[in-house]
Amino acid sequence: MLPLTHATPGVYWEQSVSSPAPEFLTGVPVLIGFATKGDVARPQLLTLWTQFVEIFGIAGTSDLPDAVQGFFGNGGRACYVVRLRDFISIEAALAEALEAIAVLDGVDLVCAPDLATSSQDTAQLLPMQEALLDYCQEMGDRFAILDTHRNATIDDVVEQQQQLSSHPGSHNSALYFPWIQVQHLNTSLPKLIPPCGHIAGIYAQSDLDVGVHKAPANFVINGAVDLSLLLSDAERQKLNLNNQDNQVGKINCLRILPGRGIRVWGARTLSQDAAWRYVNVRRLFLMVGRWIDRNLTNFTFEPNDIMLWIRIERELTAYLETLLAQGALQGNSPQEAFYIKCDAETNPPEVRDRGMVITEIGLAPTVPSEFIVVRLIQGETGVTLV
């Protein structure tokens, strides 16, 4: 905006309204699958379910339309959709799609329902899901929501869990079981589909209501009318068995609770590392990394001195104090919730000579209360709840 031309010297003031900064969204998945029309391996940003129908159609046997509808039906606001190429191996089509979405900036979740739909057994599904974990590990800012294959037994799911938990990128993934039953989009008849699209919508809604630090669990799955398998307490215990010698990641079960609908009953990653046990904790750190990547690039090529270190600490402190105020971090004060260190100790001469600025950040994330224990004590005055 050019300044106005003034006739005489003096002091003048002008009023302008600045444009708001773009919203930093989380819970934005890319959904990958087959479609009957639309460009192949070209990400399309959608904010409405009707846009999917217009661009990709709902004909065919793919579960991608149901996943996208489930995403929006469970609170999702925006997603990217990528159509897989037909007439080549699904592994090659997936590799092409992952290459196409690498350039996307606003994505933090990855779902591929048709990988599960196209797999006959765990052995066929695992290599493709491992490719997703490779991709999320390489990108460093994305989290994969994984499914089992259609006819998976309890033993199949345990095998899948154990194999994926040994992957280096397992901390960037979560596995959900069983499949859900929805109404077919064309015939309104019952249809079983992988739950990942619906789960992604729940992630997005949880992020909007509270934030990524909220565990995306104990939410009703809108659009689900039944489950492919009703798990007994013994089966859920087997799926969530905690090996003390090897902290294998757990499977997030879906449950039908009488009078409370079909709900997500778990918020665990597949990681063997106890530090990354919870989905919300891992996603919090991924979000902080995305924020740093987006907001600290202005400091690139600045003189590497104490003034730069102070500016970096100031920017990070302001952001982390915001997270503390939102309840994302533990502690009654910033000193208890996080620390930031960017000084001569983290940046000795040999580091500065390489053109690097190193900053250490420590966070104390909140963790979900998975186990609510109520003690019943019977005494002379009656039963007391403790």
Image (cartoon, rainbow, N blue to C red):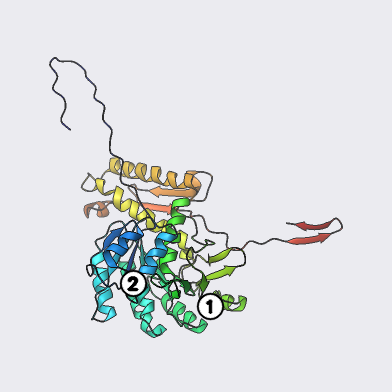
Vertical order, 142 against 96 (above or below):
above
Horizontal arrangement in the rendering, residue 374 relative to residue 253 (left or right): right
Nearer-the-camera pick, 22 or 137: 22
Q: Which residue is mark 1?
A: 229
Q: Which residue is mark 2?
A: 132
Extreme-front residue of the structure? 187
Give the residue type that dot 2 points to. Answer: Leu
Instruction: Determine the secondary structure under disc 2.
Output: helix
Label located before the other in sequence (2 or 1)? 2
Going 52% across and 66% down the picture, which residue do you hit?
A: 266
Going 44% across and 65% down the picture, which residue do you hit?
A: 199
Nearer-the-camera pick, 189 or 65: 189
Query: Can you give x and y, in whole percent of width and height, for residue 290 in the image?
Result: 33, 55
Instruction: Determine the secondary structure under disc 1.
Output: loop
Which mark's residue is nearer the viewer, 2 or 1?
1
Q: Quadrant of the C terminus?
A: bottom right
Give the residue type that dot 1 points to. Answer: Leu
Mark 1 is surrounded, within 10 Å at the Cα level, by few (under 14), some (14 to 19) or many (20 or more) other residues, namely some
